Amino acid sequence: MPGLTIGDTIPDLEAETTQGKIKLHQFCSDSWTILFSHPGDFTPVCTTELGKMAEYAKEFNERGVKLLGLSCDDIQSHNEWIKDIEAFTPGCKVSYPIMSDPRREIIKKLNMVDPDEKDSSGNNAPSRALHIVGPDLKVKLSFLYPATTGRNMDEVVRVVESLQKASKFKIATPANWKPGDPSVIQPSVTDQQAKDMFPQGFQTKDLPSGKNYLRFTKV
Ligand code: BEZ
């Protein structure tokens, strides 16, 4: 069954969080947002991931990105769990809200269900889903990891940078791109347009086809 994916508008649902009730559209509008789910409270990989997210909160804040976590357990459980998270990653403060979803309704609407993972009551647990949502409330990028694979927050920062650059300039970021590396100019841009758009200049790679489509620039 298809679920929420790139280009879709996120649903405008209400959720209880560790910082009070939110309406998702209100929370996410006018900024970039990372929505990320976890299989469950008091589980090992999740405890490391939420601590890392807290450690990287400054990186996301500097880029105008809000964080919003989700684990199905209730708010009381989340608040107890936060003490473990902060103890495991010393110096980190879980300053972002974490949604609860005891009826497993939100995880269905956000395409965050792991069909193979059940909690101790036999309910479907969330996957490690992560959606990066733009200020227009549309999903720009999603990761979908199983419970057994923790996410890499450097990769999350890297893709945020790529998305934000591509939303400002007609560029794309090539394989293994890192912030500061040259980007490539989008194929829809003619060389003449590229001269106007990128006054800093661009370099065209000579290829056997003779087609001048691989053009590098720095933005
Ligand atoms: C974890 O977060 O460590 C985890 C949760 C469910 C299954 C496997 C690992």
Image (spheres, rainbow, N blue to C red):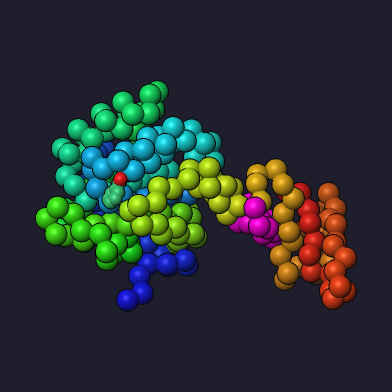
User: How far from the left and from the top, in percent, is residue 8?
Assistant: 42, 67
Q: Is residue 48 above or below residue 124?
A: above
Residue positioned 47% across, 66% down in the render: 6
Q: Nearer the viewer, residue 105 or 146?
A: 146
Asked whether 25 falls inside the magenta stretch, the response is no
User: How far from the left and from the top, in percent, is residue 145?
Assistant: 40, 57
Q: Nearer the viewer, residue 116 or 1?
A: 116
Residue positioned 83% across, 49% down in the render: 200
Q: Nearer the viewer, residue 145 or 140?
A: 145
* 80 lies left or right of 3: left
* Stretch of the chain drawn in magenta: 165-176
* 185 lies left or right of 149: right
Asked whether 170 falls inside the magenta stretch, the response is yes
Residue positioned 36% across, 57% down in the render: 146
* 135 lies left or right of 35: right
* 215 lies left or right of 166: right
User: How far from the left and from the top, in percent, is residue 130?
Assistant: 41, 54
Residue positioned 28% across, 56% down in the render: 126
